[in-house]
Amino acid sequence: MTKDTNESPVWEGKLFSGGWRAGSGDPVTVTAPGTDRLLGTVAGATPADLDQAVETARVAQRAWAAAPYAVRAAVMLKAAALLEADPARLAEILVAESGSGQGKSGFEVGLVVSELQESAALASHPSGEILRSVKPRLSLARRVPLGVVGVIAPFNFPAILAMRSVAPALALGNAVVLKPDPRTSVSGGLALAALLEEAGLPEGVLHVLPGGGELGAALVAHPRVPCISFTGSTAAGRKIGEAAAPLLKRIHLELGGNNAMLVLPDADVQAAASVAAWGSFLHQGQICMTTGRHLVHRSIADAYVAALAEKATHLPVGDPIDPTNALGPLIDERQRDHVHTIVTDTVAKGATLAAGGEYDGLYYRPTVLTDVAPDSPAWTEEIFGPVAPVQVYDDIDEAIDVINASEYGLSVSILTGNPHAAFELCDRIDSGAVHINDATVDDEAVAPFGGAKASGAGGRFGGPHANLDTFTETQWVTVQSDIERYPF
Ligand code: NAD
């Protein structure tokens, strides 16, 4: 492995906690998946670093929450402006460290900018309501910060999945301790800290501690962290739920998915194949909202599979530093082997490979599977790879049952020539999101985002109502002129 730059970035050898400093854990190497280029090293954190971070954050939070809202809004706006002026500061590390294609990294940076802008607006949003009371008094419900919010984020869209918790939590007057995935310590944490620091965030309000699942578990268990915002796998989310329940802390879990795309017989087949390829192959399928199940009406299924397989066969896959490559590498060998095992086991159960099913290092070819048995792993499990399993249906009621049979409920797409009729199907679909005539992969900073069933529990992200519910506590306050008189 060779290091490809002589300049030391601010995060080199450091973590972010009361400024840039060394950690007490083992160093974490930052590498580029697919090429193994060494990008640098960051400091690993231990539970001792966590204790220190939480104590510093508790003190800093009080002054941060007491500052006028305009101070918090200004930091968010400045960070958004800095990133808009120089998107490469984040986009380049997203490409290198997380294997993001250039289109995906640009899209992700845009999401981070709008998350910061919406969080600036959140800081000035009304923070409660005046209540009616049976007594002559002022009675109000007001939103107060939670204190120190723990954020645990995954590797796949590391910057936005961290920032969608960090920015609203900070804007509402909380301090934050962020633990990114160790494979994306920079793009999912330290690069965001550098941006917010440059935008004027006071020292001690945000801490970024690189480390693995054990450090995440210590954050969940920390008695002075009253709220955890977790994005990651359903398996880890269940463990966090179990650990947090006896501690009676507030947890928000955004978890896995196995998202269905329903293609009705009146859909335009070529347009549907494009939505399908985007939904299943973007970022190598490593998205919670990836289309994992294609349910296609029999009358158009052959044409649909042919069009999708054609796209899969010709999509360029390789080092994402080359902008002509649409897809980059999977994050690591473990994930690659997981994807390939699911594909080969599904073929062994009778499925047909219409495209792909092969790899070179971490570069997995976009794959289309047909004749997929309903009990095969490619149909029942979240793959997190560029794989499009297709099943044919005849009857819409049967198709809705198949969609709802999954344990997950994150995002569903319906493609049709009659969107108003499709709207009526929304009532029958158990899913946090339904997109008619668009992909399962969709996100906006102003829309409430979150999963049903095994895809999530707790609060939603996005928009002032969801973020206020998620990152504040409600306090009932009454005020009256005279001391109330009681019978005894
Ligand atoms: P993961 O659950 O293994 O890891 C996610 C994060 O949790 C990492 O920072 C990891 O270090 C930490 N972690 C792991 N075990 C933990 C524990 N016991 N306690 C505390 N922290 C722990 O997830 P992954 O497999 O690396 O990421 C992909 C998964 O994330 C997929 O299932 C995907 O669907 C899901 N995801 C969900 C959303 C969403 O918004 N619903 C978004 C992106 C990814």
Image (cartoon, rainbow, N blue to C red):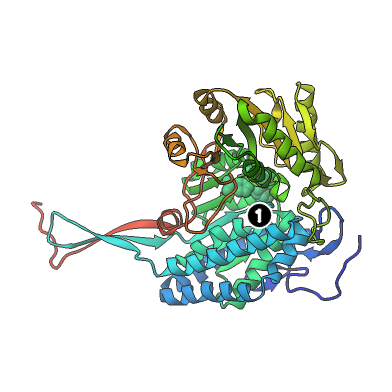
Give the residue at x 63% y 53%.
153
Residue 415, compared with residue 441, is above or below; it is: above
Residue 284 visible at all: yes
Residue at image location 80% in from the left, 42% down from the top: 313
Query: In the rendered image of this protein, does residue 372 appear above or below residue 102?
Result: above
Residue 264 position in % (x across, y down): 55, 33
Query: Which amino acid lies under the numbered mark 1 shown in the image of this protein?
Result: Phe
> Which of the 4 image quarters holds residue 29?
bottom right
Q: How far from the left and from the top, in percent, is residue 395?
A: 53, 23
| Left or right of 478 in this view: 172 | right
Q: Nearer the viewer, residue 67 or 377?
A: 377
Report which residue position mark 1 lands on: 157
Q: Quarter-wise, where is residue 476 in the image?
A: bottom left
Residue 461 placement, left or right of 325? left
227 or 386: which is nearer to us?
386
- Mark 1 and ligand 1: say if the CB distance to the nearest ligand atom is below 8 Å: yes
Q: Position of residue 92 (x, y in %)?
A: 74, 66
- Local packing at callout 1 (Cα closer than 10 Å; few below 14, some 14-19, many 20+) is many
Judged from the image, the secondary structure of the residue bearing numbered disc 1 is loop
